[in-house]
Amino acid sequence: MSPLAADYPSWKFYPSRARPPDWVDPLIAAFKAAQPVLDSREHQGITSDAALAALRPSLVALGFEVEAGKRKADKIRRPVLFGELGAEDLAYEVDGFHAGDGIALEVEAGRGARGNAVYRDLVEASLLVDARYLVLAVQLAYSHKSAGRPISVRSYADSRNLFEAIYASSRLVLPLEGVLLVGY
């Protein structure tokens, strides 16, 4: 672990040329408060639902609307397209949304970073009406077995490499004001 990663959680705001918005510190404090339950370096098998449940009280206190369960009524839907008479034509579900700051929140666990969830979250957040920022939380460490061999996945490091490439290149310009990547 690098000296910078010794603090929990790890995080980086993109674009790196911009000062992180004021809402970042309180949001990081929510992850820090949930460390005893969430720290993926210490706890294996944390699901995204369990991670979101651990964060939910702090996120709600910060003004986020947060998914409460798997029933349709518990989901957070955000519009993407509108059709006839201004009715919602297409919407995506997110783990949380802060309407005041336009923050879409996605919490991934396990193989999320390897299963292209990070790409899906990035594209979907980019299409949400009123989304100005994406907060993407992924595990720092995830271990599993493949063909009987132990595999270690560095979800946060892999996701950070992706965002470094996106923001260093001029080939893909995101319609978001910023992305906060959090490693928990």
Image: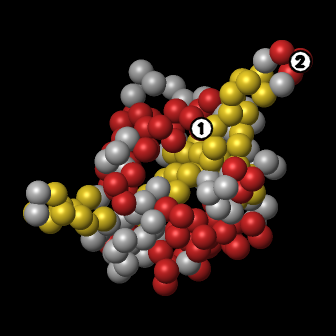
Q: Could you tell me if residue 88 is visible in this image? A: yes
Q: Place residue 163 in its image quadrant.
A: top left
**Vertical placement of residue 135 versus 81, above or below:** below
Percent of width and height locating residue 91 = 68, 33
Q: Which residue is mark 2?
A: 85
Q: Which mark is residue 125?
A: 1
Q: Residue at x 51, y 41 (%)?
A: 121
SS for dot 1: helix
Percent of width and height locating residue 132 = 68, 39
Percent of width and height locating residue 17 = 52, 43
Within 10 Å of disc 1 (Cα), the crowding (few <14, some 14-19, many 20+) is many
Within 10 Å of disc 2 (Cα), the crowding (few <14, some 14-19, many 20+) is few
Amino acid on which the number 1 mark rests in the picture: Ala
Quick one: which residue is furthest to the bottom in this view?
A: 36
- Judge by depth and name the residue closer to the eye, 67 or 8: 67
Quick one: which residue is furthest to the top in this view?
A: 84
Side (left or right) of 160 relative to 52: left
The span from disc 2 to disc 1 (Cα, nearest Å) is 24 Å
- Judge by depth and name the residue closer to the eye, 174 or 124: 124
Percent of width and height locating residue 82 = 77, 22
Q: Place residue 2 in its image quadrant.
A: bottom left
Q: Earlier in the sequence, mark 2 or mark 1?
A: 2
SS for dot 2: helix
Q: Residue at x 56, y 35 (%)?
A: 124
Side (left or right) of 173 relative to 21: left
Q: Quadrant of the N terminus?
A: bottom left
Amino acid on which the number 2 mark rests in the picture: Leu
Q: Place residue 167 in its image quadrant.
A: top left
